[in-house]
Image (cartoon, rainbow, N blue to C red):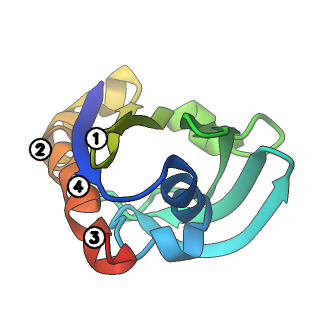
Amino acid sequence: MATGTASATFGLTADEYLSFVLDVERYRQVDDKLGPIDWVRTDGNVTEFRFRPKMPLMPWSPKVVSRMTLTPGQRIDIEYAPKPHNRLAHLLSSFFAFFSVEPVADGIEVTRSVTISLPALLRPVERVTLGRQLQASVERELDFTPAVLGA
């Protein structure tokens, strides 16, 4: 299992930041793990989108549909959408991520976490690629956010 977790403070409201994340085409500007997005669908507090993940040394990553569930003003939980989507992805990996937002004196503190796990046969790839790169990628997302949002 590979996990990347980072936190940062932004001079934004929770709703402003969470709206930015839910705008996946815009959020893609700060997230180097998101390849081209095929489509985005939102129904209430659930947003699903189809894309090809961009992972170092893993060009074979299948397209996936991710499901983001918003808890307004607090967090977004992200996972693979259930079957029939992601049949191959469910066989090759498990995925969970979140953004949590807490109010602080000068805005919000955002915590971003991503966890990816591959089956035993692919664990060497997990250690070589994901284990070394996921933490840096998550930190980069938060580092690049102010330039995109002006926060």
119 to the left or right of 1: right
Secondary structure state at the residue bearing disc 3:
helix
- Which mark lies nearer to you, 3 or 2? 3
Residue topped by disc 3: 146
State which tag comes first along the sequence, 4 or 1: 1
Secondary structure state at the residue bearing disc 4:
helix
Residue topped by disc 2: 132
**How far across and how far down the image is residue 34, in percent?**
45, 65
**How far across and how far down the image is residue 32, in percent?**
33, 67
User: Mark 3 Cα within 10 Å, few/some/many (few <14, many 20+)?
Assistant: some
Q: Spatial distance from mark 3 to mark 4, Cα to Cα?
A: 16 Å
User: Mark 1 Cα within 10 Å, few/some/many (few <14, many 20+)?
Assistant: few
Q: Amino acid at mark 1?
A: Ala
Residue topped by disc 4: 137
- Which mark lies nearer to you, 4 or 1? 1
Q: Spatial distance from mark 4 to mark 1, Cα to Cα?
A: 27 Å
Residue at point 68% right, 39% down? Answer: 69
Q: Is residue 113 visible?
A: no
